[in-house]
Image (cartoon, rainbow, N blue to C red):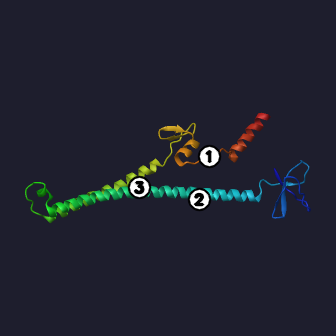
Amino acid sequence: MWTFATGHSPRVSKGSVAINGSFHLSRKESRNDADVTIPRSLHEVANRVIIRVIEASQAELATENRLMRIQTHVSRILWYEGLGFLAIITLSWVDELFDLTHLAGASQYISNWRESALETLIVVLVAIPVMILTKKLVSRLYYLEGFLRVCAWCKKVNYDGKWVPLTDFLELRFQTRTSQGLCLICLEDAKADAASKLS
């Protein structure tokens, strides 16, 4: 435990740390010291705040990147669909202008531009709702694929049809290595359990 020395002349002992020369922190060596206990140094608190801000920024960037990838995939699918409808319209007009059926061996066709205009209108009227529904369905599909299936009991993650621990999932999916730690709530629970077992 770190303590804050309150005397006029600073005590420099083994394990002490000076901060900006104004005060120093030292490990409490006996219970008779007249020192005031502080939980963490200012430097540790600042580091934790900075780490939390960086983690929040990284999470926000990851979410934005995921949304941009989804929008890119959706727009790519819509472009392919739009090109397909454009190809149908183009084929209709090429057939009208160059009489492709006659070139294939059928009888002579009398050109009628109104027929091609009507076909173009029908294709456009079909294309608009199809593309709107496609956008909604693909967006929904990517949204649902963004969810992880987590076992309610053991907290394993379903990845490629297998139930794997979260640490393995992070390494397989994101090539992220993990380390073990203990959060403050679990630490307090562990201390309380140990204290109850000792008493």
Tell me which label, 2 or 3, sits earlier in the chain: 2
| 191 w.r.t. 77: above or below | above
Q: Is residue 163 left or right of residue 86?
A: right
Q: Nearer the viewer, mark 1 or mark 3?
A: 1
The answer to whether residue 165 is seen in the rendering is: yes
| Quadrant where the image shows the C terminus | top right
Quarter of the image holding residue 36?
A: bottom right
Which residue shows up at 77% across the image and 38% down it?
195
The residue lying toward the viewer, choosing from 103 and 116, is 103
SS category of the residue bearing label 3: helix
Residue 178: numbered disc: 1
Q: For marks 1 and 2, give the CA distance.
A: 19 Å
Q: Residue 186: percent from the left, percent from the top? A: 69, 43
| 190 w.r.t. 143: above or below | above
Quarter of the image holding residue 118?
A: bottom left
Q: Amino acid at mark 2?
A: Ser
The answer to whether residue 118 is seen in the rendering is: no
Q: Residues within 10 Å of mark 2 (few under 14, many from 20)?
A: few
Q: Which residue is mark 2?
A: 57
* Circles 1 and 2: CB atoms closer than 8 Å: no
Q: For marks 2 and 3, give the CA distance.
A: 24 Å
Tell me which label, 1 or 3, sits earlier in the chain: 3
Which residue shows up at 26% across the image and 57% down it?
126
Q: Is residue 63 left or right of residue 4?
A: left
Q: Which residue is mark 3?
A: 73
Which residue shows up at 15% across the image and 64% down it?
97
SS category of the residue bearing label 2: helix
Q: Nearer the viewer, mark 1 or mark 2?
A: 1
Q: Amino acid at mark 3?
A: His
Residue 153: numbered disc: none
